[in-house]
Amino acid sequence: MEKILVSACLMGRKVRYDGRAKTSGDALLARWRQEGRLVPFCPEVSGGLPVPRPAAEIEGGAGGAAVLDGDARVIATDGTDVTAEFLAGARAALAAARSAGARIAILKEGSPSCGSLAVYDGTFRGRLLPGRGVTTALLERHGVAVFGEDRIAEAGARLRELEEPPPGGTA
Ligand code: SF4
């Protein structure tokens, strides 16, 4: 059975920077949870950051790939450089995905770790730009398909592709 890595905050765990969860009520996610497919994971907590913690953004509105390549840093609202913790969390997320054999991840959109379509622009003014978080960028580099919580149906289509034998294949 295919496993799916999921942002822990979407599963109701209070691990966000503000000490809250961002629980998803998605029916498909609930079914996968019952089936035992889901591997909840929070890269920022696993990378050593506390709950609660100051919000952080990738400087200059750069994407997570730039952080992986050493071309951008992740800075918290109090000015702390948290790049090392974000990188450690991304590596831990990849290790968790590999250990579970997960080829799909459903991660919280907009997060500097977990975003897959958008991240904040680094000014702490609430402005989103197209881009990926640090964990998403690392997972995608290693072949894990990442979907935000608004794209769970797309994740389901990918899951069917992975689990259903190709037409004409042997049973
Ligand atoms: Fe949720 Fe990801 Fe932020 Fe952890 S790092 S709180 S899993 S969005």
Image: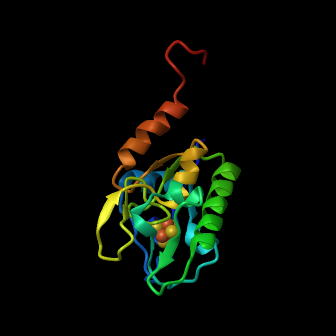
Image location of residue 105, percent across then percent down: 51, 51
Toward which corner of the image does residue 96 lie, by quadrant?
Answer: bottom right
Q: Position of residue 133 (x, y in %)?
A: 47, 60
Would residue 14 be seen by someone viewing this image from the given angle? no
Q: Is residue 71 left or right of residue 10?
A: right
Q: In the rendered picture of this protein, how many numbered marks are placed on residues?
A: 0
Q: Nearer the viewer, residue 106 or 156?
A: 106
The relative height of residue 158 versus residue 99 in the rendered view (above or below) is above
Residue 32 vertical position relative to residue 7 in the rendered view, above or below: above
Quadrant in which residue 169 is drawn: top right
Residue 102 visible in rendering: yes
Q: Nearer the viewer, residue 71 or 129?
A: 71
Q: Residue at x 49, y 84 (%)?
A: 79
Q: Quadrant of the C terminus?
A: top right
Instruction: Decide which of 46, 169 is in the foreground and name it.
Output: 46
Q: Residue at x 41, y 37 (%)?
A: 157
Coloration of the structure image: rainbow
Q: Quadrant of the N terminus?
A: top right
Residue 104, given in percent of the width and then of the height, sits at 53, 46
Q: Residue at x 47, y 34 (%)?
A: 160
